[in-house]
Amino acid sequence: MPAQTTAPAGTQWFALHTLSGQENKVKNYIEKFKKAEELSDDIFEILLPTEVVSEVKNGKKSTKVRKLYPGYVFIQMKLYGEDGKVVNKPWYFVKEVAGVIGFVGGDRPAALRQSEIDEIHARIEAANGKEVPKIQYTVGEEVKITDGAFASLTGRIDEIDPDRGKLKVSVSIFGRFTPVELEYWQVQRTTE
Protein backbone atom coordinates (compact mmCIF):
# COMPACT_ATOMS: atom_id res chain seq x y z
CA MET A 1 0.00 0.00 0.00
CA PRO A 2 1.39 3.43 -0.85
CA ALA A 3 2.52 5.53 2.07
CA GLN A 4 -0.20 7.84 3.26
CA THR A 5 0.51 11.53 3.23
CA THR A 6 -1.11 14.07 5.47
CA ALA A 7 -4.46 15.29 4.17
CA PRO A 8 -5.22 19.00 3.96
CA ALA A 9 -7.20 20.46 6.85
CA GLY A 10 -10.95 20.11 6.51
CA THR A 11 -10.91 16.87 4.53
CA GLN A 12 -13.00 13.93 5.69
CA TRP A 13 -13.75 10.44 4.40
CA PHE A 14 -17.09 9.74 2.72
CA ALA A 15 -18.61 6.65 1.11
CA LEU A 16 -19.90 6.89 -2.44
CA HIS A 17 -22.57 4.48 -3.60
CA THR A 18 -21.85 3.38 -7.18
CA LEU A 19 -23.52 1.26 -9.80
CA SER A 20 -22.46 -2.37 -9.56
CA GLY A 21 -19.33 -2.99 -11.59
CA GLN A 22 -18.62 0.74 -12.03
CA GLU A 23 -16.36 1.19 -8.99
CA ASN A 24 -13.08 1.17 -10.98
CA LYS A 25 -14.44 3.61 -13.57
CA VAL A 26 -15.60 6.00 -10.85
CA LYS A 27 -12.25 5.86 -9.04
CA ASN A 28 -10.22 6.31 -12.24
CA TYR A 29 -12.39 9.17 -13.50
CA ILE A 30 -12.13 11.14 -10.26
CA GLU A 31 -8.37 10.60 -10.07
CA LYS A 32 -7.92 11.61 -13.70
CA PHE A 33 -10.09 14.72 -13.78
CA LYS A 34 -9.74 16.21 -10.27
CA LYS A 35 -6.64 18.11 -11.43
CA ALA A 36 -8.23 19.28 -14.70
CA GLU A 37 -11.24 20.54 -12.74
CA GLU A 38 -8.92 22.30 -10.27
CA LEU A 39 -10.13 20.15 -7.38
CA SER A 40 -6.76 18.82 -6.15
CA ASP A 41 -7.14 20.90 -2.97
CA ASP A 42 -10.65 19.53 -2.36
CA ILE A 43 -10.34 15.86 -3.33
CA PHE A 44 -7.43 14.10 -1.70
CA GLU A 45 -7.59 10.29 -1.91
CA ILE A 46 -9.91 7.70 -3.46
CA LEU A 47 -9.99 4.13 -2.10
CA LEU A 48 -11.34 1.00 -3.75
CA PRO A 49 -10.37 -1.85 -1.38
CA THR A 50 -9.78 -5.20 -3.10
CA GLU A 51 -8.37 -8.67 -2.45
CA VAL A 52 -7.07 -11.45 -4.70
CA VAL A 53 -9.31 -14.54 -4.70
CA SER A 54 -8.37 -17.94 -6.10
CA GLU A 55 -10.63 -20.76 -7.21
CA VAL A 56 -10.43 -23.92 -9.25
CA LYS A 57 -12.79 -24.60 -12.13
CA ASN A 58 -12.45 -27.67 -14.34
CA GLY A 59 -9.10 -28.48 -12.73
CA LYS A 60 -7.58 -25.08 -13.53
CA LYS A 61 -6.60 -22.57 -10.84
CA SER A 62 -7.59 -19.00 -11.54
CA THR A 63 -7.23 -15.81 -9.59
CA LYS A 64 -9.22 -12.62 -9.78
CA VAL A 65 -9.50 -9.37 -7.91
CA ARG A 66 -12.60 -9.05 -5.74
CA LYS A 67 -13.87 -5.82 -4.22
CA LEU A 68 -14.06 -5.86 -0.42
CA TYR A 69 -17.00 -3.42 -0.51
CA PRO A 70 -18.86 -3.99 -3.80
CA GLY A 71 -20.84 -0.95 -4.92
CA TYR A 72 -18.81 1.52 -2.84
CA VAL A 73 -15.83 3.82 -3.31
CA PHE A 74 -14.34 5.78 -0.43
CA ILE A 75 -13.23 9.35 -0.98
CA GLN A 76 -11.28 11.71 1.23
CA MET A 77 -12.37 15.22 0.36
CA LYS A 78 -13.30 18.67 1.55
CA LEU A 79 -17.08 18.53 1.28
CA TYR A 80 -18.05 21.09 3.90
CA GLY A 81 -16.78 24.63 4.29
CA GLU A 82 -15.93 26.29 7.60
CA ASP A 83 -19.54 27.49 7.77
CA GLY A 84 -20.75 23.85 7.71
CA LYS A 85 -22.34 24.20 4.27
CA VAL A 86 -21.64 21.92 1.33
CA VAL A 87 -18.88 23.21 -0.97
CA ASN A 88 -20.64 23.16 -4.35
CA LYS A 89 -17.79 22.56 -6.80
CA PRO A 90 -16.46 19.22 -5.38
CA TRP A 91 -20.00 18.15 -4.42
CA TYR A 92 -21.36 18.47 -7.95
CA PHE A 93 -18.19 17.15 -9.58
CA VAL A 94 -18.38 13.89 -7.61
CA LYS A 95 -22.18 13.53 -7.88
CA GLU A 96 -22.05 14.00 -11.69
CA VAL A 97 -19.43 11.27 -12.28
CA ALA A 98 -20.90 8.52 -14.45
CA GLY A 99 -21.59 5.48 -12.28
CA VAL A 100 -22.06 7.41 -9.01
CA ILE A 101 -25.49 6.92 -7.45
CA GLY A 102 -24.69 9.40 -4.68
CA PHE A 103 -23.07 9.93 -1.34
CA VAL A 104 -24.07 7.53 1.40
CA GLY A 105 -26.28 9.71 3.57
CA GLY A 106 -27.99 11.57 0.72
CA ASP A 107 -27.93 15.36 0.49
CA ARG A 108 -26.23 15.77 3.88
CA PRO A 109 -23.72 12.88 4.04
CA ALA A 110 -22.02 12.21 7.34
CA ALA A 111 -18.28 11.66 7.29
CA LEU A 112 -17.04 8.19 8.16
CA ARG A 113 -15.64 7.81 11.66
CA GLN A 114 -11.88 7.38 11.98
CA SER A 115 -12.42 3.86 13.37
CA GLU A 116 -14.29 2.92 10.16
CA ILE A 117 -11.47 4.22 7.96
CA ASP A 118 -8.89 2.46 10.14
CA GLU A 119 -10.83 -0.80 9.67
CA ILE A 120 -10.91 -0.32 5.87
CA HIS A 121 -7.16 0.37 5.81
CA ALA A 122 -6.57 -2.72 8.02
CA ARG A 123 -8.57 -4.89 5.60
CA ILE A 124 -6.59 -3.52 2.66
CA GLU A 125 -3.30 -4.18 4.48
CA ALA A 126 -4.40 -7.71 5.47
CA ALA A 127 -5.33 -8.51 1.85
CA ASN A 128 -2.19 -6.94 0.39
CA GLY A 129 -0.01 -9.57 -1.29
CA LYS A 130 -2.17 -12.47 -0.12
CA GLU A 131 -4.32 -14.75 -2.16
CA VAL A 132 -7.46 -15.93 -0.38
CA PRO A 133 -9.57 -18.88 -1.45
CA LYS A 134 -13.04 -18.21 -2.76
CA ILE A 135 -14.27 -20.99 -0.46
CA GLN A 136 -13.47 -21.05 3.26
CA TYR A 137 -12.97 -24.44 4.92
CA THR A 138 -13.34 -25.57 8.53
CA VAL A 139 -11.44 -28.15 10.60
CA GLY A 140 -13.21 -31.51 10.53
CA GLU A 141 -14.80 -30.91 7.14
CA GLU A 142 -14.63 -33.70 4.57
CA VAL A 143 -13.05 -32.78 1.22
CA LYS A 144 -12.17 -34.45 -2.06
CA ILE A 145 -8.65 -33.96 -3.40
CA THR A 146 -8.79 -32.73 -7.00
CA ASP A 147 -5.11 -32.30 -7.87
CA GLY A 148 -1.75 -33.93 -7.23
CA ALA A 149 -0.65 -37.43 -6.26
CA PHE A 150 -3.72 -37.99 -4.07
CA ALA A 151 -6.31 -36.79 -6.60
CA SER A 152 -9.76 -38.41 -6.23
CA LEU A 153 -9.19 -39.44 -2.60
CA THR A 154 -11.34 -37.97 0.14
CA GLY A 155 -10.09 -36.86 3.50
CA ARG A 156 -10.80 -34.81 6.61
CA ILE A 157 -9.28 -31.39 7.28
CA ASP A 158 -7.11 -31.49 10.41
CA GLU A 159 -5.43 -28.07 10.21
CA ILE A 160 -5.87 -24.84 8.28
CA ASP A 161 -3.02 -22.38 7.66
CA PRO A 162 -4.69 -19.34 6.03
CA ASP A 163 -1.43 -17.34 5.92
CA ARG A 164 0.21 -19.94 3.68
CA GLY A 165 -3.02 -21.05 1.96
CA LYS A 166 -2.42 -24.65 3.06
CA LEU A 167 -4.57 -27.40 4.54
CA LYS A 168 -3.50 -30.55 6.39
CA VAL A 169 -5.85 -33.30 5.29
CA SER A 170 -5.93 -36.84 6.68
CA VAL A 171 -6.45 -39.39 3.91
CA SER A 172 -6.73 -43.15 4.17
CA ILE A 173 -3.82 -44.82 2.37
CA PHE A 174 -3.44 -48.60 2.68
CA GLY A 175 -5.87 -48.63 5.60
CA ARG A 176 -4.00 -45.97 7.59
CA PHE A 177 -4.78 -42.28 7.98
CA THR A 178 -1.92 -40.17 6.72
CA PRO A 179 -1.67 -36.36 6.93
CA VAL A 180 -1.13 -34.66 3.58
CA GLU A 181 -0.38 -30.96 3.10
CA LEU A 182 -2.36 -29.42 0.25
CA GLU A 183 -3.15 -25.98 -1.09
CA TYR A 184 -6.71 -24.68 -0.82
CA TRP A 185 -7.28 -24.96 -4.54
CA GLN A 186 -6.31 -28.65 -4.58
CA VAL A 187 -9.48 -29.71 -2.75
CA GLN A 188 -13.20 -29.23 -2.98
CA ARG A 189 -16.09 -29.93 -0.66
CA THR A 190 -17.53 -33.41 -1.02
CA THR A 191 -21.01 -31.83 -1.18
CA GLU A 192 -20.17 -29.78 -4.30
Image: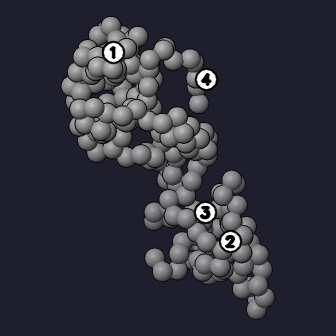
Foreground disc of the pair 2, 4: 4
Residue 149 in the image, given as x and y percentages of width and height: 68, 71
Residue at the spot of label 1: 83
Q: CA distance from mark 3 to mark 4?
A: 32 Å
Q: Which one is earlier in the sequence, the residue at label 3 or at label 4?
A: 4
Q: Which residue is mark 4?
A: 3
> Residue 8 at what x, y percent from top left?
49, 14
- Amino acid carrying label 3: it is Tyr
Nearer the observer: mark 2 or 1; the answer is 1
> Which residue does the image show at 33% across and 15% down from the upper left?
83
Q: Neighbour class for label 3 at 10 Å: few (<14), some, many (≥20)?
A: many
Tell me, yes or no, whether the two marked residues, 2 and 3, touch with CB atoms within 8 Å: no
Residue receiving disc 2 = 149
Q: Residue at x 39, y 11 (%)?
A: 40
Residue that badge 3 annotates = 184
Reply above or below: 124 against 27: below
Give the CA distance from mark 3 to mark 1. 54 Å
The amino acid pointed to by label 1 is Asp
Are the two marked residues, 4 and 1, in contact with CB atoms closer than 8 angstroms?
Answer: no
Which one is nearer the viewer's eye here, 135 or 108?
Answer: 108
- Snapshot quadrant of residue 110: top left
Q: Alpha-carbon distance for marks 2 and 3? A: 15 Å
Depth check, front residue: 110 or 77: 110
Q: Please indicate whether residue 183 sits to the left or right of residue 77 in the image.
A: right
Crowd rating for badge 2 (residues with CA inside 10 Å; few <14, some 14–19, many 20+): few
